[in-house]
Image: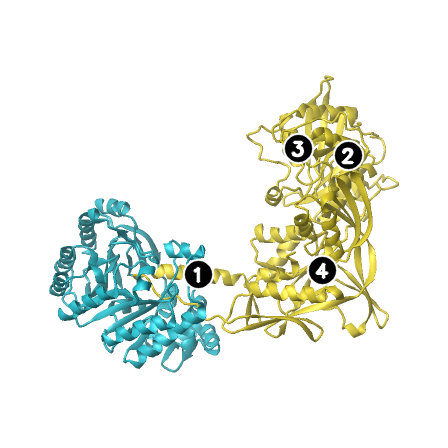
Amino acid sequence: MQNMKSKNIRNFSIIAHIDHGKSTLADRLIEKTGLLTSREMHSQVLDSMDLERERGITIKLKNVRLNYKAKDGEEYVLNLIDTPGHVDFNYEVSRSLAACEGALLVVDASQGVEAQTLANVYLALEQDLEIVPIINKVDLPSARPEEVKQEIEDIIGIDASQAPLVSAKKGLNIEAVFEELVNKIPAPKSDDKAPLKALIFDSYYDSYKGVVSYIRVFEGTIKPNMEIKMMSSNKHFEVTEVGITTNKQIPVKQLNSGDVGYVVASIKNVKDARVGDTITDYNNPTETPLPGYKKVIPMVYCGIYPAEGEDFNTVRDALEKLQVNDASLVFEPETSVALGFGFRCGFLGLLHMEIIQERLEREFDLNIITTAPSVIYNVKTSEGKILSIQNPTNLPDQSEIEYMEEPIVSTSIMTPTDYVGAVMELCQGRRGVFKNMEYLEETRVTMYYELPLNEVIYDFFDALKSKTRGFASLDYELKGYKESELVRLDVLINGELVDALSIIVHKDKAYERGRKVVEKLKEEIPRHQFAIPIQAAIGSKIIARETVKALRKDVLAKCYGGDISRKKKLLEKQKEGKKRMRQIGSIEVPQQAFLAVLKYDE
Amino acid sequence: MKKLGIYIHIPFCSNKCYYCDFVSFPKFNSEMDKYIDYLLLEMEIYKKLLDEYTIKTIFIGGGTPSYIDEQIIVKILEYIYKNFDAKKVEEITIEANPETLNEDKINLYKQIGINRISIGVQSLSDKLLNAVGRRHTTKDFLKSYDLIRKAEFDNVNIDLMFGLPNQTVDDCIETLEEVIKLDVDHISYYSLILEEKTLMNRWYNKGKIVLPDEDIERQMYHNGINLLKSNGYKHYEISNFAKEGFECKHNLLYWQIEPYVGFGISAHSNLNNKRFWNYKNFKDYYNMLDKRLAPVCGEEKIDKKMEMAEYLIMGLRLIDGINKDEFRNRFNQNVEDIYYDTLIKHQEGGLLSIDDERINFTAKGLDLSNIVYVDLLP
């Protein structure tokens, strides 16, 4: 297997919009090559994190090697490199695509081409990949395969006439996918004699082996005992194991050019084996690294604090453990007056943030409180200093600010024409600047808007989905910074400023946001023994106010025939609820109240 | 000899009231004789275990114990007298509904030694009674009350409820005034609790009935307390009022965490630092007894920490609260050494009143007792 000539190797990814059936197709390919029997198959084997399977999305990519005997009688090695399907992970997608020669483009036969389909296709085209369209879900009554083929040709401009019509779910016509794959996607170029040049497209931490990196070898060979060097950092390590991944990791003597596999080199931290970096031979280095490496920069920040009774150090340990596997997660300690000691964490995007939160809660069983997400603002002070602010608390007094800048993203929103009005209304409401609109076909358009990132992170995606009945799709990338009139909106609970609830908003939005935040908090904060005023303020000026009425009754009138256990159970339930609260002054605030500032409720 | 309370559960009634989630089976007359046989069998199993106890109180509850044939009640009590030490029993209560009582029944209760009758009246408004599924009228109650007094029962309790659908503060006060005029010895004045599996809860969730809002409901409670107090009733527990010397001795055992044993399906016991409870259905209850096993389906061991918490939680239900010396005598520790933070917090918050001798709820604390209880739980 190891000495498979590179002409019989195919390295490929599957790209698709969320829900178009990428993971199901991957499952089917794995199953058909007999790597796993269907009994062994969990549904969607590549999405091994629970969270991924629940959300139906792939977060961390992985790869798997399949063997296929084609109709031409030859044995092929097919390396499937899975990619994350969400806009937050664009960079990771681009690196795994860079490891391939081709990509299967899965398009839902009912939904047709969507914004992320396009975004991923463009990423694949940038890498000069051969794109093989596959029409999936043809078994559904709403399927319109011929129209969708036409769409692919019209919108993307690639030939879809040969596209196999499949149902990954039912296992229909999967053979055709293999044949297209073998025939259309080129074999990798190979040069075993050249100095080593290999691309890291994923790394994770294994508690026994240390960091395991998935790599694609472009030139040269790699084997155990070899000294290797990371070209971005010049750090060097000794290889202890190389191998390939089938249903498990199988060590091999050597990986050759064209191969996809894994390497272990007693690396302690994934930061030293970053996605996109080039590995070379320490003693015989290649001259230039593979193109495209960049250190990913967090776009969204929020505070993560231990909830009542949770320990600061256990939260730190958990974050460190997650970071070992996720070089794009950054965090540093910070202190909040309201919440005490915690961490400011940076994420690639909102989804990434939600995933980290959920993993902390599920995998580490932690009770945490998350503050409202923030983007990074540039602040020019009257003294001429430029500050970079990602925590609203650190914003200087208004009088000391000369001007502020906020990040702007270019977004493309693909929607049926019926919803153009609704999308425009939404974008304008979010301070969007209309750029352009392209008709993809008679009934569908792509709208281009420039939007402040701080508007996009507040519930924009949910609002877009609800205003278009789920039909619109969104893609965005950072465009740059723009001067803007921004203010800090503070929240006072029972007269006390709760720094963890402060947000930076545009001046024109402050009143509306303030009113919504206090209304929402009124619903979330349980009644206490006394009435609690909730106020929104800009500086010392109160702009909105609500009151949580005093609790008048919290009593069990009767105890039933000596059944004290039942009474205690009720009290224990009440106590359990209190654990999810955070004490601020004399007020108990539930965790979800901190998310109140997050949701627009449009 | 240690003192003990006995609870007997009679799981039968004429019909289910709309708010009721007790274990009771309406009109299941065919089951009664069999049930009583097993009930006696259960008592037999405990004979040995209860050797070292003398019975202080007996409480026959339900269901509606007065619904079943009075001879069955006789049979039960005779069994107890014969097999346990009941020489010094101070209080024997039976729960009764007005429409099920008659002169013979009442007289027989008296003869067999019952010395306290607890009548489920709930309200003296026929409209409200009808609305919550009660089968009696005010007239029925007055008639049976008269018979009870004629039979020379000198310790009578009346259960009343407030916070019923469409009930007004005036309704409550009128009912209380009537009851006071009748010179009853003990009044339980309960706030309606909507239990999950009841008809009433379903109606409430569907919006079919409207309950008084919280402020009105508290007015019913506070005004009721004032009225009863000014008429010579002592407010001695969150929901209970009595003339001097007429506090319910059996319930005091619950509130003071003293031992008691419950017989019958779903009955609860507290004995030897253990709380345990019986099966809730006839089948499992019978099956266990067929094997001569106690029909217990669950238990909770009470360690010292939990016992102290229970002692405070239940003890604070009493208006006089708990006595610090009694706490020290029972646990060999000062209550303030253990619960200092909680006690201070709620004293400052105005829910607890603490002096050299006692700890008890303030008026506000009685309305918000759960807030304190949650902090007392271990």
Q: Nearer the viewer, mark 4 or mark 2?
A: 4
Q: Toward the viewer: A330 or B255?
A: B255
| Discs 3 and 2 carry the same chain letter | yes
Q: Which chain is yellow?
A: A
SS class, disc 1? helix
Q: Which mark is residue A26?
A: 3
Would residue A171 be found to the left or right of residue B237 on screen?
A: right
First of labels 3, 1 by sequence position: 3
Q: What kind of residue is marked 2?
A: Cys
First of labels 4, 1 by sequence position: 4
**Inter-mark Cα distance, 3 to 4:** 36 Å
Q: In this figure, which residue is indicated by the disc labeled 1?
A: A572
Q: Position of residue B96 (x, y in %)?
A: 22, 62
Asked if residue A510 is positioned above or below residue A429 in the image, the reply reads: below
Q: Nearer the viewer, mark 4 or mark 1?
A: 4
**Inter-mark Cα distance, 4 to 1:** 36 Å
